[in-house]
Image (cartoon, rainbow, N blue to C red):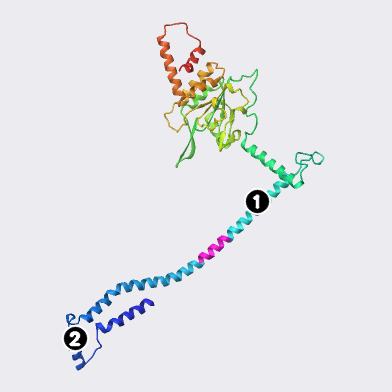
Amino acid sequence: MAVGRACMCLWHGLRPKLATPVRSGPSLLRSWSSWSPPSRQPHRWSGLRKRWDSIPALRRGLADAGAGSSGSGSGAGSGASGRSADQFSQRAMKYTFVAFGAMFTGVGGFLVVTWGAPPLDEEGKEIEDEFSHMPRWKAHLYRTYKELQLYNKMIKDPSRDKLLPDPLTEPYYQPPYTLVLEMTGVLVHPDWTYQTGWRFKKRPGVNHFLQQVGPPLFEVVIYTSEQGFTAYPILDTLDPQGYIMYRLFRDATRYTNGHHVKDLSCLNRDLSRVIMVDWSAEACSLQPRNALRLPKWDGSDDDRTLIELAQFLRTIATSEVEDVRTVLDYYSQFDNPLEAFKENQRKLQEEKQQVPLEPSPSQRSWAMGLWKRQ
């Protein structure tokens, strides 16, 4: 409506300059004779030109005015709806906080009443403890705090003090060494594709490796940070012959500084005869001298690490090393211990070919030379 009125005003303002009323007779002749070309009426046509040039700017102003009037109406409506939405969100947030506060208060009160109650004997009488001399409300709080600390300790510490049973005795055979293996990154690799989803890829040479290092040389133990329900079916498929004697999962680790650390002191074995193969420095942080760290397997099909590792471990076992930590200390200085072992083996073979034929040394003395060479 505002645009129409403005256009009418503009038209009426230009009309006297563009045309004259229809006349007849002498009046028409007078008007016709009084008309002269633009060159003879500069003042009239210059005013008309100015008004004509001002039409685009006027149109833009009218359009802006119309948009502003319509925008103000829509803005008012959107502002009202926005305010109502904000009020609803504030009310919902307030009720949510109230509900959560009531829930946590109820749970906290239940724990204080349950965990903070004094212990009772068989007859239902209270047993005195270190908090019995305190006021009743204070004793309840202290007992609750103590229970929370116990639960926290249960979550972070291994599930039991002895992760493995006592070594076998006669007439059963106990392997002289214990080999602790990480599953993920050493034996298998997690792989994901659009077609199959998540699956665990078997490392080349796994069957040969377990056969070479299994009993009677090593007591093979899987000690992984994976959950039991994930690792159990994988290990069943990985080791159908049963070379793996024990399986330990995440509940057997010690949670420290955001990492699941393997505590070999809970294995119930002599640490001088325990070798742990892993790729994670955090997992081996409690007993680093017992760790043989290898690069993490990335899933490549041309990998031969397990074949070389089997040869390395068999050399240690057949050499009857008293303390495996002396061997592992030497190879820990190399980025790739297996490459260093292969190089020492090659040098030893070359020296044996150069030395004149003599009575062959024992197998133990030959193997010990593999890691005593600098």
Q: Residue at x 53, y 16 (%)?
A: 318
The label shown at residue 93 is none
Element class at badge 2: loop
Horizontal arrangement in the rendering, residue 108 relative to residue 292 (left or right) = right
N-term-proximal mark, 2 vs 1: 2
Work out whether 65 lies above or below 359: below
Q: Residues within 10 Å of mark 2 (few under 14, many from 20)?
A: few
Task: Provide residue 293's location: percent of width, then percent of height.
Answer: 50, 28
Task: Provide residue 85's location: percent of width, then percent of height.
Answer: 53, 63
Q: Nearer the viewer, mark 2 or mark 1?
A: 2
Q: Residue at x 52, y 25 (%)?
A: 210
Query: Is label 2 in contact with label 1 (beta carbons under 8 Å)?
Result: no
Q: How far apart are marks 2 and 1 (CA)?
A: 96 Å
Work out whether 126 lies above or below 267: below
Q: How crowded is mark 1: few (under 14 residues within 10 Å), some or many (20 or more)?
A: few
- Taking depth in this image into account, of 179 and 211 the one nearest to the observer is 179
* Magenta segment boundaries in residue numbering: 81-90
The quadrant where residue 70 appears: bottom left
Q: Pointer 2: what residue?
A: 35
Q: Give the amino acid at mark 1.
A: Phe
- Taking depth in this image into account, of 90 and 250 the one nearest to the observer is 90
Q: Residue at x 36, y 72 (%)?
A: 63
Q: Magenta region, mostly helix, strand or loop?
A: helix
The quadrant where residue 252 appears: top right
- Magenta stretch: residue 33 in it? no
In the picture, the quarter occupied by the C terminus is top left
Q: Which residue is drawn at 60% across and 56% down?
A: 96
Q: State whether residue 98 appears in this view.
A: yes
Q: Pointer 1: what residue?
A: 104
